Image (spheres, helix red, strand yellow):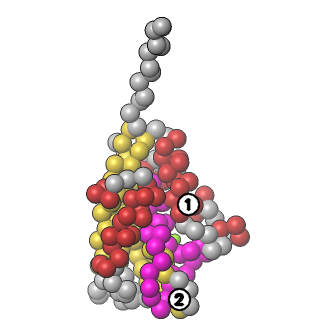
Amino acid sequence: MRIGSGFDSHEFRPGIPLKIGGITLPHDKGLGGHSDGDVLLHAITDALLGAIAAPDIGALFPPSNPKWKGADSAIFLREALKRVRDAGYRVANIDASLILAAPKIGPHAAVIRARVAELLGLHCDCVGLKAKTPEGLNLDNAALAHVVVLLEKTPRQKKKAPKRK
Ligand code: MG
């Protein structure tokens, strides 16, 4: 088994869509960033990459590359997942904490969990999501995400015995 942890933060900016966990949430501000600013998918991506000691999201998808401007962060997550599978592992479960003052995540948590589960090929029961407000941190204009992921070895496929005629 391997464990990975991921962290990310993005600043809120007016006039852009808010994407969290691959879902566009109704809000008057979005998260700035070179890609779509999806703080949760970035933290999950880094947790997956960290678990297999691969280069991090910034190394694989540098903000200096115009190719990733406005990119759907699901692209980053899929690449990380491919690397996990190529290394002989599969995701057992993930647990995420979102820290943001607004909007309230509760009403959207089930949809976000379902989308993250879909992207990772997991059952919803294997995706934990908690949301907290940044009390005492003076971070009301930012969203933060912490993620822990557990990987397990992919079982080897048994070779099928040749059929007898
Ligand atoms: Mg990021």
Q: Does mark 2 have its CB less than 8 Å from ligand 1?
A: no
Instruction: Name the outermost residue toward the right.
Output: 66
Picture quadrant of residue 156: top left
Give coordinates of residue 128: x percent, y percent: 30, 63
159 vs 148, nearest the viewer: 159
Specify whether residue 96 is in view: yes
Compared to residue 27, the image places residue 74 above or below, namely above
Q: Amino acid at mark 2?
A: Arg
Give coordinates of residue 50: x percent, y percent: 45, 54
Left or right? Give the position of 65 relative to 46: right
98 vs 136, nearest the viewer: 98
Q: Which of the labelled discs sits on residue 13, or is there none?
A: 2
Q: Which of the labelled discs sits on residue 76, or is there none?
A: 1
Picture quadrant of residue 159: top left
Give coordinates of residue 124: x percent, y percent: 32, 59
Q: Amino acid at mark 1?
A: Phe
Q: Residue at x 51, y 59 (%)?
A: 77
Left or right? Give the position of 127 relative to 11: left
Left or right? Give the position of 128 relative to 78: left
45 vs 127, nearest the viewer: 127
Q: Residue at x 43, y 58 (%)?
A: 118
The range drawn in magenta is 21-48
Q: Residue at x 44, y 20 (%)?
A: 160
Query: What secondary structure is found at the residue carrying circle 2?
Result: strand
